[in-house]
Amino acid sequence: MTLVATAALLVGLLAPADAPWCGLTRLSGYVRTEHGPYTYDGTPILTAEPIAAASWDVRLGAVADIDGVGSFRIADRGHLGNGSPMPWVDVAVWSRSEAFALTSVRTVCFRRPPA
């Protein structure tokens, strides 16, 4: 198993563990108004809360601290990035220009949400 694959596996094991896991993560955005009314965990998509979708190796409820972007609760799932050698986060945004601007690979730390 490669180092990147091992790191991706650890995201699923550690997030949202007490100690955060940080590493390179594929980042993209999706427009809130272009999909269904609820996220995978039942959160209304039009919430003002900063939320994101993530690959299945990141637990729902984890918080993704994205370098240079902000913190987002993982509330949704999607089809991009599954089976990829690194985790993937798709941030819920309000416009396509925001979504395109997010597309990159960045350092993301996954942690337990505040109690």
Image (cartoon, grey):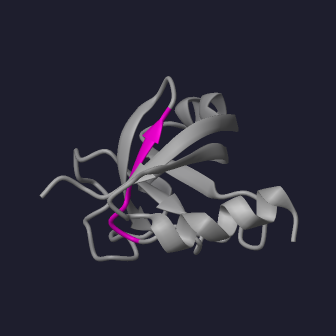
Q: Nearer the viewer, residue 33 or 108?
A: 108
Asked where in the image residue 5 lies, by quadrant, the reply is bottom right
Asked where in the image residue 6 lies, by quadrant, the reply is bottom right
| Residue at the extreme right of the image, as rendered | 2
Q: Is residue 114 left or right of residue 21?
A: left
Residue 103 in view of the camera: no
Q: In this view, does 99 lie to the left or right of 91?
A: right
Residue 29 magenta-drawn?
no
Q: In this view, does 61 lie to the left or right of 76?
A: left
Task: Specify the quadrant that holds the N terminus.
Answer: bottom right
Residue visible at 50% across and 57% down in the picture: 34
Residue 48 in view of the camera: yes
- State how many labels appear: 0
Asked where in the image residue 79 lies, by quadrant, the reply is bottom right
The span shown in magenta is 60-66
Residue 72: horizontal and vertical position, in percent? Answer: 37, 46
Q: Which of 92 and 83 is in front in this view?
A: 83
Task: Specify the quadrant that holds the C terminus.
Answer: bottom left
Residue visible at 38% across and 54% down in the picture: 19
| As drawn, 92 above or below 68 | below
Residue 27: horizontal and vertical position, in percent? Answer: 63, 44
Q: Nearer the viewer, residue 52 or 16?
A: 16
Q: Nearer the viewer, residue 30 or 14?
A: 14
| As drawn, 12 above or below 93 | below
Residue 61 magenta-drawn?
yes
Residue 15: horizontal and vertical position, in percent? Answer: 44, 64
Residue visible at 54% across and 42% down in the picture: 108
